[in-house]
Image (spheres, rainbow, N blue to C red):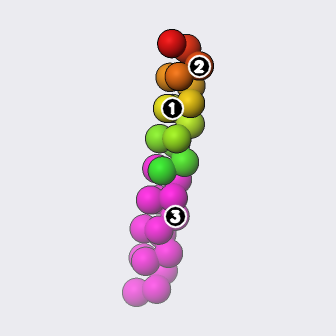
């Protein structure tokens, strides 16, 4: 049970990080 929660939070964190990265790249390009 704990493992799935950890995995989910890791996925969410990675997704947020990826989104921030794409936004920064987007602003750099335009």
**Residue 3 position (above or below residue 26):** below
Q: Residue at x 42, y 76 (%)?
A: 4
Q: Secondary structure under badge 1?
A: helix
Q: Which residue is mark 2?
A: 28
- Tags 1 and 3 touching, CB below 8 Å: no
Main SS, magenta region, reads: helix
Q: CA distance from mark 2 to mark 3?
A: 27 Å
Q: Secondary structure under badge 3?
A: helix
Q: CA distance from mark 1 to mark 2?
A: 10 Å
Quadrant of the frame with the N terminus? bottom left
In the image, 2 versus 22, the foreground residue is 22
Q: Which residue is mark 3?
A: 10
Q: Could you classify mark 3 by the number of other residues whose Cα lies within 10 Å: few (under 14), some (14-19), or many (20 or more)?
A: few
- Location of residue 19 in the rendering, given as x and y in whole percent from the top left corner: 47, 41
Chain-order first, disc 2 or disc 3: 3
Q: Is 3 included in the stretch rendered in magenta?
A: yes
Magenta part of the protein: which range?
Answer: 1-15
**Residue 13 position (above or below residue 25):** below
Q: Could you classify mark 1 by the number of other residues whose Cα lies within 10 Å: few (under 14), some (14-19), or many (20 or more)?
A: few
Q: Is 25 included in the stretch rendered in magenta?
A: no
Q: Which residue is mark 1?
A: 22
Chain-order first, disc 1 or disc 3: 3
- Location of residue 10 in the rendering, given as x and y in whole percent from the top left corner: 52, 64
**Residue 9 position (above or below residue 3):** above
- Tags 1 and 2 touching, CB below 8 Å: no
């Amino acid at each position: 049970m704990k493992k799935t929660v950890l995995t989910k939070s890791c996925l969410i964190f990675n997704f947020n990080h990826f989104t921030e990265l794409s936004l920064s790249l987007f602003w750099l390009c335009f």
